[in-house]
Image (tube, grey):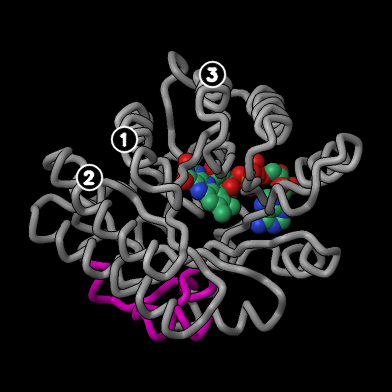
Amino acid sequence: MLAEVSKNVFLHASQNKALNKAAKKWGLRFGAAQVVAGDTIEHAIKKVRELNEKGLVCTLDHLGEFVSSKEEAIEATQYNVRTLEAMGQAGVTCNLSVKMTQLGLDIDRSFCVENMRRILETAKKYDNFVRIDMEDYAHCQMTLDILRELRKTFDNVGTVIQAYLFRAEQDVKELKGIPLRLVKGAYQESPTVAFQDKAQIDENYMRIIEEHLLSGTYTAIASHDHNIIAKVKEFAHKNNIPRTQFEFQMLYGFRTDMQLSLAKEGYTMRVYVPFGNDWFGYFMRRLAERPQNVAFALKGFFSK
Ligand code: FAD
């Protein structure tokens, strides 16, 4: 009950425009620096290099919420282009994750697709890959439609499927051949479109992971759940799925010991590294996911 209340409080805070805007001026606070890798490209690349040296590969995410004008979307696009260039020049092992609302999806669909094309062209130049993060259900169909459109020209783009959605299994079947990141799902969705029960979500999660792995397509399993990770390892072993066909992904600052031990065991372990001054919404969503995370937020709050 208490966990549900705190989840709702944090999810509401994550959607509060005024708080998000104010937080941009605060600098990283409340322990956010433990899960956000600094506010500039330079800071982020430095962290990525450190992680690479430990045997971890990365994906960078330039944080950005509530883009409501074309100017903001162009700025975000340019920032993503610069991030790809900086990664290429630094020679780090890292790809890029982007959210299409940041590129103007809610403003003008074709303008957003053009922005995405610019990012993908830059990625292509550096032989790099771009993952379109999946946002809330309202954007799901649009995201998948745009992905299909982009895949006609670009083979260096993939997206994310959320196991809590009833449609997930069908989507995974239809997207066979396209590299996918599979997750449980981070947003609050209606019971008309999504499982609400943890056991059902976990069950559907394993179902779509197995489906995608068996299809022979490259699969990223993005989870901090040790039970899921153990099941994936066992399933891959039993079904002779080579380790080159999948990777594990976790968020920067979460289960660091497990990240390192998976890399030591020889699995590809990719760390999702968010950065930028628009950190508040991301941080609130992480607190909503796992009330235990509040402990380090409070620690950060009192140590300021
Ligand atoms: P949970 O169901 O949160 O946890 C299961 C169990 O694992 C817990 O009960 C606990 O025993 C253990 N556990 C979990 N976390 C910890 C911890 N920090 N320390 C110790 N034990 C722990 N969601 C989207 O909707 N769209 C996206 O594009 C997206 N991209 C993502 C990218 C990455 C790399 C990752 C890791 C997640 C992403 N997510 C995304 C979020 C995802 O959907 C889940 O909300 C989030 O990962 C929480 O689910 P989980 O699988 O980690 O495990």
Which numbered tag is attached to residue 113? 2
Which corner quadrant of the image does residue 97 belong to?
Answer: bottom left
What are the residue bounds of the magenta stretch?
22-47
Which corner quadrant of the image does residue 296 belong to?
Answer: bottom right
Q: Amino acid at mark 2?
A: Val
The answer to if 37 sits in the magenta stretch is yes
Q: Depth check: 70 or 287 in front?
A: 70
Q: Amino acid at mark 1?
A: Glu
Q: CA distance from mark 2 to mark 1?
A: 9 Å
- Count residues near mark 3 (Cα–Cα under 10 Å), then give few for <14, some for 14-19, many for 20+: few
- Residue under pointer 1: 149
The quadrant of the picture occupied by the C terminus is bottom left
**Residue at 66% in and 22% down:** 200
What is the secondary structure assignment of the residue under circle 3?
helix
The quadrant of the picture occupied by the N terminus is top right
Q: CA distance from mark 1 to mark 3?
A: 19 Å
**Residue at 20% in and 63% down:** 21
Q: Residue 281 in the image: x percent, y percent? A: 35, 55
Q: Residue 70 in the image: x percent, y percent? A: 9, 54
- Residue under pointer 3: 170
Check if mark 2's residue and mark 1's residue have beta carbons within 8 Å. yes
The CB of the residue at mark 3 lies under 8 Å from ligand 1: no
Answer left or right for 68 relative to 299: left
What is the secondary structure assignment of the residue under circle 1?
helix
Which corner quadrant of the image does residue 96 belong to?
Answer: bottom left
Does label 2 or label 3 sit earlier along the sequence? 2
| Residue 135 drawn above or below residue 116 | above
Q: Residue 147 in the image: x percent, y percent? A: 37, 38
Q: CA distance from mark 2 to mark 3?
A: 24 Å
Answer left or right for 299 relative to 113: right
